[in-house]
Image (cartoon, rainbow, N blue to C red):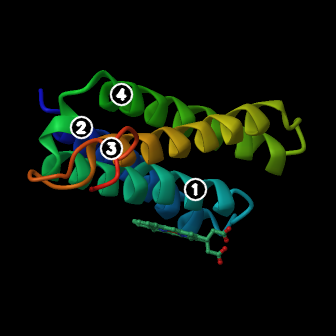
Amino acid sequence: MKLATKFFLAATVFALCGMVWGIVMSASHDYLLAPAHGHLNLLGFVAMGIWGAYYALTPTAAASNLGRSHFALSVLSVVVVVPGIVQVLLGQGELLAQIGSIALVANMLLFGVIVLRFGAGAQAPNDLLTAQPAE
Ligand code: HEM
Protein backbone atom coordinates (compact mmCIF):
# COMPACT_ATOMS: atom_id res chain seq x y z
CA MET A 1 0.00 0.00 0.00
CA LYS A 2 1.25 3.48 -0.86
CA LEU A 3 2.53 5.57 2.04
CA ALA A 4 0.08 8.38 1.20
CA THR A 5 -2.80 5.89 1.34
CA LYS A 6 -1.64 4.72 4.77
CA PHE A 7 -1.59 8.31 6.03
CA PHE A 8 -5.07 9.02 4.63
CA LEU A 9 -6.52 5.78 6.06
CA ALA A 10 -5.03 6.49 9.49
CA ALA A 11 -6.36 10.06 9.26
CA THR A 12 -9.83 8.70 8.49
CA VAL A 13 -9.76 6.32 11.46
CA PHE A 14 -8.56 9.07 13.82
CA ALA A 15 -11.18 11.49 12.47
CA LEU A 16 -14.00 8.98 12.91
CA CYS A 17 -12.89 8.32 16.50
CA GLY A 18 -12.60 12.07 17.14
CA MET A 19 -16.02 12.78 15.66
CA VAL A 20 -17.76 10.04 17.63
CA TRP A 21 -16.00 11.40 20.73
CA GLY A 22 -17.28 14.89 19.87
CA ILE A 23 -20.83 13.61 19.47
CA VAL A 24 -20.59 11.79 22.83
CA MET A 25 -19.35 15.03 24.47
CA SER A 26 -22.21 16.99 22.93
CA ALA A 27 -24.82 14.42 23.92
CA SER A 28 -23.57 14.12 27.49
CA HIS A 29 -22.87 17.87 27.94
CA ASP A 30 -19.56 16.84 29.50
CA TYR A 31 -16.77 18.81 27.86
CA LEU A 32 -13.97 17.94 30.30
CA LEU A 33 -12.02 15.99 27.68
CA ALA A 34 -12.52 18.54 24.86
CA PRO A 35 -8.79 19.38 24.60
CA ALA A 36 -7.96 15.69 24.06
CA HIS A 37 -10.70 15.47 21.40
CA GLY A 38 -9.25 18.59 19.73
CA HIS A 39 -5.75 17.13 19.70
CA LEU A 40 -6.97 13.81 18.30
CA ASN A 41 -8.69 15.59 15.44
CA LEU A 42 -5.95 18.11 14.72
CA LEU A 43 -2.96 15.77 15.01
CA GLY A 44 -4.74 12.59 13.93
CA PHE A 45 -6.77 13.99 11.07
CA VAL A 46 -5.43 17.37 9.96
CA ALA A 47 -1.69 16.72 10.39
CA MET A 48 -1.89 13.14 9.08
CA GLY A 49 -3.90 14.41 6.11
CA ILE A 50 -1.33 17.09 5.31
CA TRP A 51 1.45 14.52 5.51
CA GLY A 52 -0.52 12.15 3.30
CA ALA A 53 -0.85 14.90 0.69
CA TYR A 54 2.90 15.56 0.92
CA TYR A 55 3.73 11.89 0.26
CA ALA A 56 1.21 11.72 -2.60
CA LEU A 57 3.03 14.67 -4.19
CA THR A 58 6.56 13.48 -3.41
CA PRO A 59 7.12 9.86 -4.50
CA THR A 60 10.81 9.81 -3.63
CA ALA A 61 10.01 10.63 0.00
CA ALA A 62 7.15 8.10 0.00
CA ALA A 63 9.49 5.33 -1.15
CA SER A 64 12.10 6.05 1.52
CA ASN A 65 12.72 4.42 4.90
CA LEU A 66 12.54 7.88 6.44
CA GLY A 67 9.00 8.25 5.11
CA ARG A 68 7.96 4.86 6.48
CA SER A 69 9.50 5.74 9.85
CA HIS A 70 7.62 9.03 9.78
CA PHE A 71 4.32 7.19 9.38
CA ALA A 72 5.06 4.80 12.26
CA LEU A 73 6.16 7.63 14.57
CA SER A 74 3.15 9.76 13.56
CA VAL A 75 0.66 7.05 14.50
CA LEU A 76 2.57 6.22 17.68
CA SER A 77 2.70 9.88 18.75
CA VAL A 78 -1.07 10.34 18.39
CA VAL A 79 -1.83 7.04 20.11
CA VAL A 80 0.39 8.04 23.06
CA VAL A 81 -0.32 11.76 23.41
CA VAL A 82 -4.12 11.66 23.26
CA PRO A 83 -4.55 9.23 26.18
CA GLY A 84 -1.78 11.25 27.87
CA ILE A 85 -3.89 14.42 27.62
CA VAL A 86 -6.89 12.49 28.96
CA GLN A 87 -4.79 11.42 31.95
CA VAL A 88 -3.71 15.02 32.59
CA LEU A 89 -7.31 16.26 32.39
CA LEU A 90 -8.40 13.54 34.84
CA GLY A 91 -5.53 14.38 37.21
CA GLN A 92 -3.94 10.97 36.74
CA GLY A 93 -0.37 12.05 35.96
CA GLU A 94 1.62 13.61 33.17
CA LEU A 95 4.13 10.96 32.09
CA LEU A 96 2.27 9.72 29.02
CA ALA A 97 1.59 13.28 27.83
CA GLN A 98 5.27 14.13 28.29
CA ILE A 99 6.41 11.07 26.33
CA GLY A 100 3.83 11.79 23.62
CA SER A 101 4.88 15.44 23.40
CA ILE A 102 8.53 14.53 22.94
CA ALA A 103 7.53 11.96 20.30
CA LEU A 104 5.51 14.66 18.51
CA VAL A 105 8.43 17.08 18.44
CA ALA A 106 10.79 14.34 17.23
CA ASN A 107 8.23 13.43 14.58
CA MET A 108 7.98 17.01 13.31
CA LEU A 109 11.79 17.30 13.24
CA LEU A 110 11.87 14.07 11.22
CA PHE A 111 9.39 15.57 8.78
CA GLY A 112 11.63 18.63 8.46
CA VAL A 113 14.60 16.39 7.65
CA ILE A 114 12.50 14.53 5.05
CA VAL A 115 11.48 17.81 3.38
CA LEU A 116 15.10 18.95 3.30
CA ARG A 117 16.22 15.57 1.99
CA PHE A 118 13.56 15.04 -0.69
CA GLY A 119 12.05 18.48 -1.28
CA ALA A 120 8.38 18.62 -2.25
CA GLY A 121 6.76 17.51 -5.48
CA ALA A 122 7.52 14.94 -8.14
CA GLN A 123 10.18 17.18 -9.66
CA ALA A 124 11.72 17.95 -6.29
CA PRO A 125 15.20 19.49 -6.28
CA ASN A 126 18.24 17.51 -5.22
CA ASP A 127 18.97 16.67 -1.63
CA LEU A 128 18.99 20.04 0.13
CA LEU A 129 20.90 18.60 3.08
CA THR A 130 23.92 17.65 0.99
CA ALA A 131 23.52 19.96 -2.01
CA GLN A 132 26.58 21.95 -3.01
CA PRO A 133 26.08 25.64 -3.73
CA ALA A 134 25.73 26.48 -7.43
CA GLU A 135 28.96 27.67 -9.02
C1 HEM B 1 -18.67 15.07 14.48
C2 HEM B 1 -17.72 15.99 14.54
C3 HEM B 1 -17.38 16.77 15.80
C4 HEM B 1 -18.13 17.01 16.92
C5 HEM B 1 -19.55 16.54 17.23
C6 HEM B 1 -17.32 17.85 17.80
C7 HEM B 1 -17.71 18.30 19.06
C8 HEM B 1 -16.96 19.11 19.87
C9 HEM B 1 -17.37 19.60 21.19
C10 HEM B 1 -18.72 19.30 21.85
C11 HEM B 1 -16.38 20.35 21.68
C12 HEM B 1 -16.32 21.05 23.04
C13 HEM B 1 -16.79 22.47 22.87
C14 HEM B 1 -16.72 23.23 24.18
O1 HEM B 1 -15.88 22.90 25.05
O2 HEM B 1 -17.48 24.18 24.33
C15 HEM B 1 -15.31 20.37 20.69
C16 HEM B 1 -14.12 21.03 20.82
C17 HEM B 1 -13.12 21.06 19.88
N1 HEM B 1 -13.10 20.38 18.68
FE1 HEM B 1 -14.57 19.19 17.99
N2 HEM B 1 -16.12 18.08 17.20
C18 HEM B 1 -16.11 17.45 15.98
C19 HEM B 1 -15.07 17.44 15.05
C20 HEM B 1 -13.89 18.15 15.16
C21 HEM B 1 -12.86 18.22 14.16
C22 HEM B 1 -12.93 17.53 12.79
C23 HEM B 1 -11.87 19.01 14.66
C24 HEM B 1 -10.55 19.41 14.06
C25 HEM B 1 -10.16 19.13 12.85
C26 HEM B 1 -12.27 19.42 15.99
C27 HEM B 1 -11.53 20.22 16.82
C28 HEM B 1 -11.93 20.69 18.03
C29 HEM B 1 -11.15 21.59 18.86
C30 HEM B 1 -9.78 22.16 18.51
C31 HEM B 1 -11.90 21.81 20.02
C32 HEM B 1 -11.52 22.70 21.19
C33 HEM B 1 -10.84 21.88 22.24
C34 HEM B 1 -10.60 22.68 23.50
O3 HEM B 1 -11.50 23.41 23.94
O4 HEM B 1 -9.52 22.56 24.07
N3 HEM B 1 -13.50 18.87 16.27
N4 HEM B 1 -15.69 19.61 19.60
Q: Mark 1 points at which residue?
A: 39
User: What amino acid type should be assigned to the residue bearing mark 3?
Assistant: Ala
Q: Are marks 2 and 4 in contact (CB under 8 Å)?
A: yes
**Mark 3 and mark 2: Cα distance apart in space:** 17 Å
Residue at image position (16%, 55%) is: 121
**Along the polypeptide, which appears first: circle 4 or circle 1?**
1
Q: Which amino acid does label 2 sit on?
A: Ala
The answer to whether mark 1 and mark 3 are in CB contact below 8 A is: no
Give the quarter of the figure containing the C terminus: bottom left
Residue of label 3 = 131
- Give the vertical position of 126 relative to 123 (above or below): above
Residue at horizontal 75 percent and vertical 39 percent from the top: 97
Which of the marked residues, 4 or 3, is nearer the chain's N terminus? 4
Q: Tell me if residue 108 comes above or below residue 2 in the rendering.
A: below
- The secondary structure type at the circle numbered 3 is loop
Real-space CA distance between mark 4 and mark 3, rounded to the nearest whole angstrom: 18 Å
- Which residue matches tag 2? 61
**Screen quadrant of the N terminus:** top left
Of badges 4 and 1, the one in the foreground is: 4
Q: Which labelled disc corresponds to residue 66? A: 4
Mark 4: few/some/many CA within 10 Å (<14, 14-19, 20+): some
Secondary structure at badge 4 equals: helix
Q: How crowded is mark 3: few (under 14 residues within 10 Å), some or many (20 or more)?
A: few
Residue 59 locus on image (x, y percent): 13, 40
Residue at 37% across / 32% down in the picture?
71
